[in-house]
């Protein structure tokens, strides 16, 4: 404990503490007080004497506490309060008792019932360089003009509502002409009629704390290396712009060679480059532009001017500024930058979408060696599909359609083929021809296929209540022929959905099977042992032969639509189809024709003894609810004919 530390308290004539600084409450408020000495203390102060007593006696090894006091009187000459200074050492010069802790940082003010200042502590008088009378009449002349409304509102509230206490931070001008931050704590003193007699205000200089607060705020909102706004500040800024529906352009900037600079020279060189690169960009910014560092070498400019022609000109100037090399010590560093640009609200309505779009435009610019590029949905379609595909399942963007397969012998429904569909919120409908190859490339095809199997088995199982012989066909990616655990997953799905294995057909393309023939044969054999049928899809487009396929666990061939399309007009196509059908029959394989669209195709395929067909002639692929309606209508029309 610092023995010379002082504390201040304002005490009512009845001994009640009206106000005090933090030192008083921390070190003196809870000490045991000699009540007789305290009463004598107040009595003598009331008589106008400046007194000093050790009113808190030594106990359990604690030090005595010494107190000086000054009495405060109202205009009628009645005692209002006693302002006391506490410390652990005796006061040296009793003539100093007219001051109230002039060495302390707290200021004390006492206001009358009418709001006039009746007392100003010597500390406040010294710091603000004023007399008590001047302060009484010109209180707000010392307050910063921006803070006057808030201070007036707080004082009005405490007089109007008689709140127990209120606080306010505001800036006061000192005798040196500078402004300091003051934290003011005020509470009213009420009489027996519950009327305000006085308002006690204890104020403390918190300038250093405010400086620390500002420094912390800067650390929170600004990048320490470049001194520009950081990602947190950027996100707050853009979210506010979006809420205000103010159009803007988002320019995503990436500096080339930053990793090379760090590795070739040093991280200090990399930091120097980033600082200099930021300075060059800042030379081309306008007052309303917002420039931020959101990652290691990732920067963003938010432009309020969304005119494309203007932005093109500004981007050209920006790129030109990086033609001149950077010089670090004896080294010469040459680096350029790439920029991806997207617009709110034209391209996206939220920050995440805009950042993704700007990043895609940036990648497009880097891949093509262009300095900048404006986001365009179609040009960045593949990149978006790659990024969004793993999330499509989680976001319920996938759904299934079903295309019926019909027996050419009696037009009975043999089964349905489950076909996957994807509706993207931005890109719209995405064809399986686009996303399946990407899913196969990035390894996501396993999750997609198991999802399709589960969903389709559950759906067809429901239909089998009314259509008990209905079979389900699902496409099998050749990439899954290298996944030994796939068979186990199929078993689990069949068990979970209670779907009969002998009503499931897994279709694999001819070319895909030939590329994975060894592992494929093993997995297909395991599937057949479960009871699942295997079909060769798009047959005739690959390089296999029926003689080779006869050694595989296959039960159905699907003739590719390219042979069916001109079967009635092209004799060569007709001969190929007829040959496939008869050779397949000799190997005890069933045959299905794909892409059947006309009545004459159906008639010719029936003459060739083809087993099944599917295509627009019967029905296009339909969502579950519509497919069920089609199944019911088809059965009704068939029954009517017979």
Image (cartoon, rainbow, N blue to C red):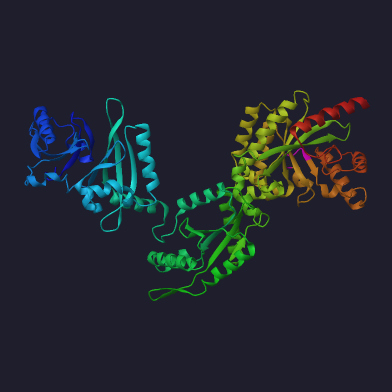
Residue 624 percent coordinates (x, y): 74, 33
Q: Is residue 419 left or right of residue 199?
A: right
Towards the viewer: 110 or 532: 110
Q: Residue furthest top?
A: 465
Q: Is residue 403 left or right of residue 161?
A: right
Comparing 509 with 267, the one in front is: 267
Which of the 4 image quadrants contains residue 329? bottom left
Task: Tell me the quarter of the image containing the C terminus.
Answer: top right
Query: Is any part of residue 2 visible from this angle?
Result: no
Exactly how many numbered labels are in the figure? 0
Place of residue 76 in the rendered image (x, y in percent of width and height, measured from the top left): 21, 35
Res 227 visible = yes
Q: Is residue 268 above or below residue 357?
A: below
Q: Please name the residue shown 91% across and 52% down the image.
A: 570
Is residue 586 or residue 383 the one in the foreground?
A: 383
Q: Is residue 502 magenta?
A: no
Residue at figure coordinates x 24%, y 54% from the top left: 129
The part of the chain drawn in magenta is: 551-556
Quarter placement of the N terminus: top left
What main secondary structure does the magenta stretch of the protein show?
loop
Provide residue 230's location: percent of width, then percent of height.
45, 55
Residue drawn where x is 63% and y is 31% of the image: 493
Compare residues 433 and 144 and report the one nearer the observer.
144
Q: Residue furthest bottom?
A: 330
Q: Residue furthest front?
A: 76
Question: Residue 637: where, in percent of width, then height?
Answer: 89, 28
| Residue 553 magenta | yes
């Amino acid at each position: 404990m610092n023995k010379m530390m002082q504390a201040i308290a304002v005490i009512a004539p009845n001994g009640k503490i009206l106000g005090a600084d933090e030192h008083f409450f921390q070190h003196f408020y809870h000490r045991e007080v000699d009540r007789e000495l305290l009463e004598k203390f107040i009595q003598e102060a009331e008589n106008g004497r400046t007194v000093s007593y050790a009113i808190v006696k030594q106990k359990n090894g604690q030090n005595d506490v010494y107190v000086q006091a000054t009495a405060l009187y109202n205009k009628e000459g009645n005692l209002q309060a006693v302002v006391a200074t506490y410390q652990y050492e005796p006061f040296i010069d009793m003539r100093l008792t007219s001051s109230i802790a002039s060495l302390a940082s707290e200021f004390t003010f006492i206001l009358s019932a009418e709001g006039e200042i009746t007392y100003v502590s010597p500390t406040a008088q010294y710091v603000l360089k004023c007399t008590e009378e001047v302060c009484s009449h010109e209180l707000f002349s010392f307050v910063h003009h921006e803070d006057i409304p808030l201070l007036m509102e707080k004082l009005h509230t405490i007089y109007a509502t008689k709140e127990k206490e209120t606080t306010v931070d505001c800036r006061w001008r000192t005798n040196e002409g500078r402004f300091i931050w003051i934290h003011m704590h005020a509470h009213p003193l009420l009489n027996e009629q519950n009327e305000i007699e006085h308002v006690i205000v204890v104020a403390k200089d918190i300038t250093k704390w405010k400086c620390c607060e500002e420094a912390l705020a800067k650390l929170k909102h600004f990048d320490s290396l470049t001194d520009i706004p950081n990602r947190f500040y950027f996100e707050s800024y853009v979210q506010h712009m979006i809420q205000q529906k103010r159009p803007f352009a988002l320019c995503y900037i990436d500096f080339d060679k930053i990793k090379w600079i760090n590795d070739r020279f040093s991280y200090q060189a990399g930091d120097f480059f980033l600082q200099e690169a930021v300075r060059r960009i800042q030379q081309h910014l306008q007052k309303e532009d917002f420039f931020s560092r959101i990652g290691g070498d990732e920067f963003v400019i938010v432009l309020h001017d969304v005119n494309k022609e203007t932005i093109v000109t500004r981007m050209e100037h920006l790129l030109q500024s990086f033609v001149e090399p950077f010089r670090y010590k004896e080294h010469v560093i040459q680096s350029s930058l790439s920029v991806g640009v997207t617009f709110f609200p034209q391209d996206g309505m939220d920050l995440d979408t805009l950042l993704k779009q700007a990043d895609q435009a940036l990648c497009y610019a880097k891949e093509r060696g262009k300095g900048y590029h404006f986001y365009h949905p179609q040009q960045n379609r593949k990149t978006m599909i790659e990024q969004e595909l793993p999330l499509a399942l989680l976001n319920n963007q996938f759904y299934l359609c079903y295309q019926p397969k019909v027996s050419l012998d009696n037009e009975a429904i043999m089964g349905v083929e489950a076909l996957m569909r994807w509706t993207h919120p931005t890109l719209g409908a995405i064809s399986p021809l686009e996303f399946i190859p990407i899913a196969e490339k990035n390894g996501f095809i396993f999750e997609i296929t198991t999802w399709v199997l589960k969903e389709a088995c559950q759906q067809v199982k429901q239909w089998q209540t009314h259509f008990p012989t209905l079979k389900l066909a699902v496409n099998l990616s050749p990439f899954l022929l290298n996944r030994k655990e796939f068979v186990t997953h199929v078993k689990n799905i069949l068990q979970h959905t209670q779907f009969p294995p002998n009503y499931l057909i897994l279709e694999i393309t001819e070319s895909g099977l030939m590329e994975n023939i060894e592992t494929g044969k093993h997995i297909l054999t395991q599937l057949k042992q479960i009871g699942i049928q295997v079909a060769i899809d798009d047959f005739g487009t690959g390089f296999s032969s029926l003689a080779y396929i006869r050694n595989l666990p296959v039960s159905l061939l699907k003739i590719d639509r390219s042979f069916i399309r001109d079967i009635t007009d092209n004799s060569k196509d007709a001969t190929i189809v007829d040959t496939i059908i008869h050779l397949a029959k000799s190997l005890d394989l069933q045959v299905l024709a794909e892409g059947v669209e006309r009545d004459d195709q159906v008639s010719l395929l029936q003459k060739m003894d083809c087993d099944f067909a599917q295509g627009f002639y019967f029905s296009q692929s339909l969502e579950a609810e519509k497919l069920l309606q089609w199944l019911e209508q088809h059965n009704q029309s068939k029954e009517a004919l017979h």
